[in-house]
Amino acid sequence: MSKILIVFCFILLFTSCEEDENFNIAISHEAYSFISYSESIGHTIKLKNLKINVGHSLSGAHYNPNNHTITIDTSSIVWKNFPEETIAHEMGHALLRRQHDFGRMRNGMYKSIMGNYSSPSYGGWSHHDTTMYRKEYYFRELFNESIEPFW
């Protein structure tokens, strides 16, 4: 009986630690963080065979609807400074079918993460937002374009 238990534990250990074949290990933390945070504010994410790869991109990241693939250039300044925002923006294209939105708030900041999130006018949350209120707003806006900022 104990030999069967040891073999079972061994199999469980090695099969449960596999990397998701659709996500490159270099960006999987940010991808799963996007899914987790979205769920924490009440939105279920269905990946629908989305692939996320590391590769070259002139803009730092892009979504290709033809093969349902997000490509992230992990050497880009955009990725190094705004990794979570980059994933959120590209997931907006891939999963929510959002287009770019360069609308501005009254204070001049971009209204949506679907705008230019690497611009100083966006503000971001990775480095600037210690209370995370910006992150909450921009995530909620991804799912509801009519939401107004609460600051």
Image: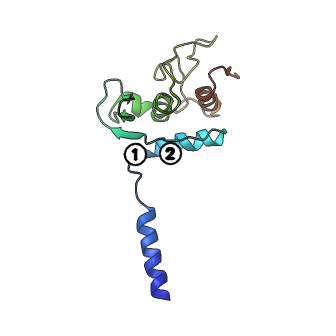
Helix, strand or loop at mark 1:
loop
Q: Position of residue 67 (x, y in %)?
A: 35, 34
The residue nearer to you, when weighing 101 against 85, is: 101
Residue at the limit of the structure toward the left, as seen here: 56
> Which residue is rendered at x = 31% and y = 28% of the image?
57
> Which residue is rendered at x = 40% and y = 45% of the image?
23
Q: Position of residue 129 (x, y in %)?
A: 59, 31
Q: Tell me how many marks there are.
A: 2
Indicate which disc residue 11 carries. none
**Vertical relation: 82 (above or below) 106:** below
Helix, strand or loop at mark 2:
helix
* Residue topped by disc 2: 32
Q: Residues within 10 Å of mark 2 (few under 14, many from 20)?
A: few
Q: Quadrant of residue 19?
A: bottom left
Q: Amino acid at mark 1?
A: Phe
> Which residue is rendered at x = 62% and y = 13% of the image?
105
Q: CA distance from mark 1 to mark 2?
A: 9 Å
The residue nearer to you, when weighing 51 against 6, is: 51
Q: Are marks 1 and 2 in contact (CB under 8 Å)?
A: yes
Closer to the chain start, of discs 1 and 2, is 1
Q: Amino acid at mark 2?
A: Tyr
The residue nearer to you, when weighing 47 against 29, is: 47
* Residue topped by disc 1: 23
The residue nearer to you, when weighing 31 against 92, is: 92
